[in-house]
Every structure is written in C-alpha cells, then in structure tokens.
Amino acid sequence: MKRRMKRGLTRGLTRRLTRGLTLIELVIALAVLAVLGTLAVPAMGSMMERHRLRAVAEELVADLTEARFLAAQGNAPVHLQAAEGPAWCYAVARQSGCGCDRPQPCQLQQVRAADHPGITLLQARAVQFAADGTASAGTVALFEARSGARLRVDMSVLGRARLCAPQGQAARTGPASAAVAPC
C-alpha cells in the first residue's frame, strides 16, 4: 500500500512538472527580457556609431593608399580633393581641382556624406601624391560622429596614411581588440 502511494505521488509530480510554464512565469520572463532590451538599445546605437566613424576613416586611409599606388604606378601625380561640413565629400582624381561635389569624368573615386550617415568631416585638406608616391605630411582629415567621438587621418612625408585618435578622445572605436592609437 505504501508502494502504491509512493507511485501515485511520483506520477502526480511528473504530471505537474510536464505541464509547462504558468502564465505568471511567462509574464515575469517577458518583463525581464523587456528591461534587458531597453538597456541594450542605447549601447548598441553608440557601438554602431563608433563603427561607422571608424569605417569612414579606414575607407579614406585605403583610398589614400590606392592613390599613392596609382601615382607611383602611372608615374604621374594623383590628387585628393575634399569638402568639409555636414554635406562633406572627397574625390581621388588624376587632375588638380577636380572637385567632389558632383560626379565628374576626372574622378577615379568619390565618397559622399550620404554614404556615411551621422558622420561629419570637420577638417580636410587637399593632398597631391607626386609621381614617386610621396606627399606633404600632416593631417588630411578629421571626422566626428554625433556623439562627439573623433578620428583623424594623418599623412607621412613618404605618403603613408594612418588612422589615429586625437588627444583627449577615447581610443576605443570598435571591438576591444581594435583600439585606435592616439595621435
């Protein structure tokens, strides 16, 4: 008899455990997920903004590297023209004075602000790569995200472009393993 009672109790517990979740448990789980989601959204937005900032700066570094290569390969100067402000742009061209405000036949490459929403080009200067691939040293561009994060693209005398974080700026603009060196 005691055995039957034990079996009956075990079957009752098993049935009870296999029923699933109660409505209260589901509501609590959804509330916890909603709270965690609202905490993650701002962090995700700022991470995306830092990613866009780094992407546009790295794109400029890549375009400058390609322009240097084209100058050396073609034994002819290659130019980078840039326009600052919220509707910024830059273009790589074989001719000096080939602006970036609209597509032109003299352009080899054109990048516009519309391609990179939320990023502003605060400071830019024209660069000329000589036939040997050298260029004048200094800051080529300073980009800023809506959050105020900034990245700078500098040029060495040998025509090598590099990405750096200006003084006082957080050097983290992406994953933990992808820190940007200070300028």
Image (cartoon, rainbow, N blue to C red):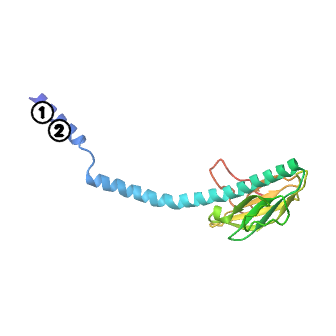
Where is 99 relative to 23, above or below? below
State the SS at label 2. Answer: helix
Residue 96 percent location from the top left of the image: 85, 64
Q: Quarter holding the C terminus?
A: bottom right
For label 2, the crowd category at 10 Å Cα-Cα, with few meaning under 14, some 14 to 19 and many 20 or more, is few
Q: Quadrant of residue 169?
A: bottom right
Q: Which residue is mark 1?
A: 5
Where is 21 relative to 149, above or below? above
Q: Which residue is found at the position 58% from the left and 60% from the top?
A: 46
Q: Which residue is mark 2?
A: 12
Q: Is residue 152 left or right of residue 145?
A: right
For label 1, the crowd category at 10 Å Cα-Cα, with few meaning under 14, some 14 to 19 and many 20 or more, is few
Q: Quarter holding the N terminus?
A: top left
- Closer to us: 119 or 35: 119
- Closer to us: 113 or 174: 113
Q: Which residue is found at the position 31% from the left and 56% from the top?
A: 27
Q: Which residue is found at the position 69% from the left and 64% from the top?
A: 112
Residue 45 percent location from the top left of the image: 55, 60
Q: Which residue is found at the position 65% from the left and 47% from the top?
A: 177
- Closer to us: 151 or 87: 87
User: What amino acid is found at the position of numbered circle 1 in the picture?
Assistant: Met
Residue 56 percent location from the top left of the image: 69, 58
Residue 22 percent location from the top left of the image: 26, 50
State the SS at label 1. Answer: helix
User: What amino acid is found at the position of numbered circle 2 in the picture?
Assistant: Gly
Q: Quadrant of residue 47?
A: bottom right
Are the residues flagged by discs 1 and 2 in contact, CB closer than 8 Å? no
